[in-house]
Amino acid sequence: MNNKKFMLPTALAVFVSSAAMAGTSFQTPQGTLSLGGDVELDMLAAKNPTTAQTKDNWDISGRILLNVAGERIVSGNRFASFQIQPLMHNNGTVDTDDAWFSFGQKDNWAFKVGRYEAYDMFPLGQDTFVDYGDSSKNNGFTDDVGYIYQMKEGRGRAGKGGQAMFSKQAGQWYAEVSSLVGDSDNLFGNSVDTGKYHDVDVERKKDNFVVRPVLSWKSSTVTVAVGAETNLIDDAYVITGTNTSVSKRTGFGSNAIWQATPDLALTIRGAYLDAVDEKDYSVGPSMQYKAFFLSYIFANNDISQGDTALTDSSADIHTVYSSYKFSNVMDMDNFDVYLGAYWSQIKPQDGFGGLGDETQERYGGKVRFKYYF
């Protein structure tokens, strides 16, 4: 019997049982196998507007991530690799961050398929705590809090959908074309099959096919990137009981990062979304100085009367957030603590999202414990 068939799983089992709290790796005939992960637990408090159902939020949340990765490199820098990241949340649920397979040639080209996050076109920065207009991936569009669009609707890790990406490196230039395919989108509600858009019931009729090209250039101190994302299936989501599509959504984004000194980095980000009866944009700078981070985002949502909206309305969203990182806690180089805070304000006009025209504010603070193993 060929023992090679059993060597990798046997080695992994040994690692899980014996590698205590330190990331490690070893060589097998199939390449390098590594095991590690991190703990990320938060204690937070937040204040919501007086109109919110829950005015005060107190919570302890987070997860433990296990990272298992493998890679084999042969002549000509050709490689094949994989990564899986199970997540164990403190509320008792279990899910996954990354689960992908990739192959190609180092510093040249690569193909990746599975579950992952593509290029970050709107980096939020160090350990952020932003709780106004959830705009992460595909779980955040609701009319009553506004939408901070960040060109993340096709970035990945969304529902049950699959992903595939081709990337190319050429000197200082990097390009990728990523896709998100299938019943991957709960953008309009808690279910992939139903939800709301501008307070109108919508349902999923077809699988999505989102494409997301990105091009970046990097020097020793500056990185610049531009990108776009669009759903090629126009009628994936329709208004319930009709053939009126709401899934045609095309977004654009860009960012620039300047490493001014070894201690100071400055970033500017912007994103624009053209959707059915709605146009959104977000823009803002951020600054990282040693362990201190500060950022501001301005967002505008502009809804036009049409198939899904009865009247014109709009909203401006101002958000400021900051954090400070305490490294090497208790003289452990793998244990950090972050202090984070945010303030956000939405100014609705003409009855945006049923809010009337009254300005609303949210603010909060958080302590994050980060431990790597």
Image (spheres, rainbow, N blue to C red):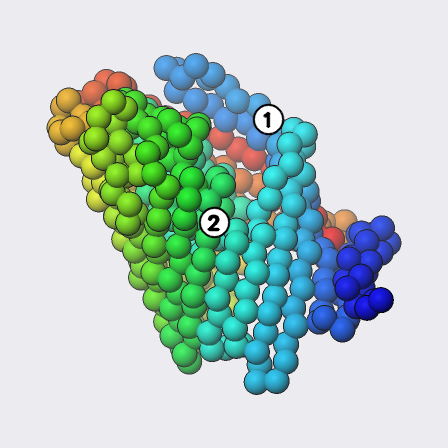
- Residue at (38% x, 68% y) in the render: 175
Question: Residue 294, image x and y in percent?
Answer: 44, 48
The reply, left or right, for residue 361 in relation to residue 238 is right
Residue 20 horizontal/vertical position (percent): 83, 52
The answer to whether residue 286 shows anywhere in this view is no
Observer-nearest of 218 and 138: 138
- Residues 11 and 218: in front is 11
Q: Quadrant of residue 34?
A: bottom right
Q: Is residue 312 left or right of residue 202?
A: left
Figure check: 168 above or below 153:
below
Q: Secondary structure at mark 2?
A: strand
Residue on which disc 1 sits: 59
Nearest to the observer: residue 198 or residue 134: 198
Q: Is residue 330 above or below residue 141?
A: below
Indicate the amino acid at tag 1. Answer: Asp
Q: Quadrant of the N terminus?
A: bottom right
Q: CA distance from mark 1 to mark 2?
A: 32 Å
